[in-house]
Amino acid sequence: MSDHTFTLGTTPSALITELCTEQCPDGYPMVIKSQREWRILSLAWNQGIDSHLEALTGRSSADASSGAVNVHPSELHVLLRRLFEADMSQGFGMADIDEAWSLRTDILSTLGVEEV
């Protein structure tokens, strides 16, 4: 059971940052083994500065050869928002959008957040 429950896409950025900072002060670590998840992650990651004037910077890292990812606690909300806002104009296909939402909910669940 999660400590926090929100409607899909509405988890506050400040809460994501707070939980990540508490639980993963050196960054949120992942190993992406699926080519499809890697594609989705790279589409979300490589948007540069977005409409919220935010970006994933050099404080976060992703290595395609090993699949190792480490997202800085203050940037995890950016990645998660981009996964939620994924659309076809950004290169995502319909199946990719479902996968992006699934990756988002999986990451949030590890922080004790459930989105329904």
Image (cartoon, rainbow, N blue to C red):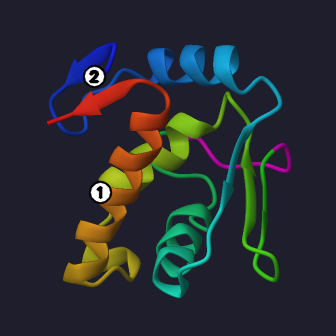
Nearer-the-camera pick, 89 or 107: 107
Image quadrant in which the C terminus is located: top left
Picture coordinates of residue 52 (x, y %)? 47, 39
Query: Is residue 48 left or right of 64 when viewed as pictured?
Result: left
Picture coordinates of residue 61 (x, y %)? 80, 56
Q: Residue at x 40, y 48 (%)?
A: 106
Magenta highlight: main SS: loop
Q: Amino acid at mark 2?
A: Met
Q: Secondary structure at mark 2?
A: loop
| Magenta span | 53-59
Picture coordinates of residue 100 (x, y %)? 35, 64
Judging by the rendered image, the residue that carries numbered circle 2 is 1
Image quadrant in which the N terminus is located: top left
Judging by the rendered image, the residue that carries numbered circle 1 is 101
Task: Answer with mark 1 or mark 2, whichever residue precedes in sequence.
Answer: 2
Q: Residue at x 49, y 16 (%)?
A: 14
Where on the picture, by quarter, is residue 47?
bottom right
Mark 1 against mark 2, which lies toward the viewer? 2
Please tell me how crowded label 2 is: few (under 14), some (14-19), or many (20+) other residues with Cα within 10 Å: few
